[in-house]
Image (cartoon, rainbow, N blue to C red):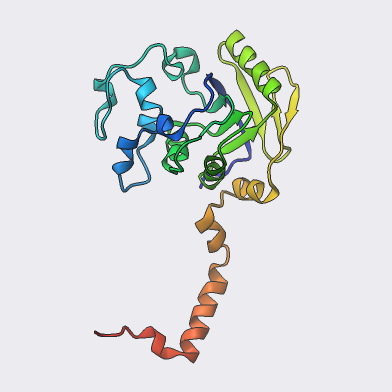
Amino acid sequence: MQKFTLHQGIVAPMDRENVDTDAIIPKQFLKSIKKTGFGVNLFDEWRYLDHGEPGQDPASRQSNPDFVLNQPRYAGASVLLARKNFGCGSSREHAPWALEQYGFRAIIAPSFADIFFNNCFKNGLLPIVLPQATVAQLFDEVAAFTGYQLTIDLERQVIVRPQGEEIPFDVVPFRKYCLLNGFDDIGLTLRHADKIKSFEAERLATKPWLAHTMVA
């Protein structure tokens, strides 16, 4: 998993409440058994005017010019600004996969659905909860300034506005530790690889029959 320490990026505003996971990555794209390739279909039903199916060439599809991510001023955005209850609906882990593979590193909103919130941390995304009034101010600033960027300092737990003003945010220490070090669940386990190997060697030395495969 990619580490998150200090990130500066263009902010894209998703000015909708209750954005669910089926809107983030529609159900037809969940057929893939791979964990990659979902970014191209992020917000598919909003980004395109035609119905999308897995394997389609995006260049052959008709983009929706009114959708925020298709507007030139938000090209390359890596911070998503959202309204309350972002990521509600079904608990598909494909939603944070799609957001991360599109290029987003952080999402700022007044509230998130619990399962989506936890899945973000496990996939290298930083979800940040801020007061609704603060989020509303950020929406106004993004609308007023083309190329509006924020700097997110996870170590210090602050968001830095372009003019230098800092906005503090909370994050659970364990989640912060995992993001700073790039540890997903597997990475956390692999920290103890030497101890695991030592345990397995000792167990086989005392119980050698465990090394044999039973024949039916």
**Quarter of the picture holding the C terminus:** bottom left
Does residue 87 appear to the left or right of 26 in the view shown? right
The mark tally for this picture is 0
* Closer to the camera in the image, 158 or 107: 107
- Residue 64 image offset from top left, x and y in percent: 36, 15
The residue positioned farthest toward the top in the image shown: 144
- What residue do we see at 59% from left, 41% from top? 4
Q: Quadrant of residue 60?
A: top left
Residue at point 70% right, 20% down?
133
The quarter of the picture where residue 11 lies is top right
Q: Name above or below for residue 42 compared with residue 177.
A: above
Query: Residue 15: x and y, percent?
Result: 53, 18
Residue 173 image point, x, y percent: 70, 48
Between 36 and 115, the one nearer to me in the picture: 115
Residue 194 to residue 63: above or below: below
Asked if residue 36 is positioned above or below residue 138 in the image, the reply reads below
| Figure check: 84 above or below 173 | above
Residue at image coords 70%, 22%:
134
198 lies left or right of 61: right
Q: Position of residue 169 (x, y in %)?
A: 71, 34
Looking at the rendering, which quadrant does residue 42 occupy? top left
Horizontal side, residue 155 vs residue 51: left or right? right
Residue beneath the point at 42% across and 90% down = 208
